[in-house]
Image (spheres, rainbow, N blue to C red):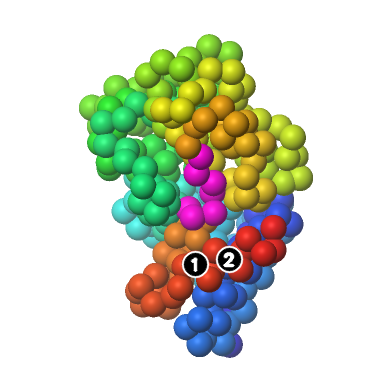
Amino acid sequence: MKRFAVIGDPIAHSLSPVLHQEIYRQIGVEAVYEKVHVSPDKLSDFMNQNELDGFNVTIPHKTTVIPFLNKLDESAEIIGAVNCISRGKGYNTDWGGFLKAMEFNDVELTEENCVILGAGGAARAVAYALIKTKVKSITIVNRTEEKAVSLIQWIKSRSDIRVDSSSLEHVNTSAREHVIINCTPVGMWPDTESVPLDLKKINETQILVDTIYNPLETKWLKQGKEQGAKIVDGLDMFIAQGLASADIWFGENISEIVDIEIIRDTLIATL
């Protein structure tokens, strides 16, 4: 029987086992998927000792896991972050999962002005997706200016998209920013009362996207919806990146043969 897992710190909130066991059920494969708590100081031990057939990687290991790998696929190498590992090779399925989620929710990104909240691995994956779709501009909002500058330079080195940074206090969300994407863990279970950005100036022309899926509708998304904005939760991105991981592990286009609505309903029932 094949064994898969997701590693992270924290990891109790993860619904990856529910997602992948439903995928295995639908395709008739005998496999198990578990969540493994791996603190930063134990990452080396885990990478040297695990006997898994494949695993996903979440906060805070998406970049620190790279030195332990033999090879990276093109997108993981460019993004500099890994969320899926198979036979010592690292992949990034987050950026494609983000684009699939936008497609599912009828969000057109081309020529839009976008804001990314955060500057970590998830933010870089989303920035890569925005580059691919040729958005008009990207504004990076991050608590640490140094990380924001690093991401800006990374974007500039790979595109001619207009990019700058703004502070949480000064980002003007009623002006040109149309799509605002939270790539931070702020608002994730169990700290569900926190919000990544004060939403005093949101309007109905804007779209708020959260990469968090637990809770399904974060406090930030609820505030945006109350002010008339279109909201997109993180569940579709989560499903899409998970299906892409399964494609890699099993060498099949599993995304085309499963019922995504049943997967979504199964996940929602656990929240």
Query: Which residue sits at x=58%, y=13%?
Result: 169
| Classed neighbour count for the residue bearing mark 2: other residues with Cα under 10 Å, few (<14), some (14–19), many (≥20) | few
Q: Is residue 20 magenta?
A: no
Residue 120 visible in the snapshot: no
Determine which residue is flagged by label 2. Answer: 265
Q: Label 1 is placed on what type of residue?
A: Glu
Quadrant in the rendering for residue 248: bottom left
Determine which residue is flagged by label 1. Answer: 261
Q: Is 193 situated above or below 85?
A: above
Task: Look at the numbered discs 2 and 1 and tell me whether their residues touch, using CB distance below 8 Å.
Answer: yes
Q: Is 139 situated above or below 126?
A: above
Q: Is residue 252 left or right of residue 37?
A: left
Q: Position of residue 135 (x, y in %)?
A: 29, 33
Image quadrant occupied by the N terminus = bottom right
Query: Which residue sits at x=53%, y=17%?
Result: 201
Q: Secondary structure at mark 1?
A: helix
Q: Toward the viewer: 199 or 86? A: 199
Q: Position of residue 113 (x, y in %)?
A: 35, 26
Q: Toward the viewer: 90 or 148? A: 148
Q: Position of residue 12 (x, y in %)?
A: 74, 57
Q: Which residues are magenta?
A: 231-237
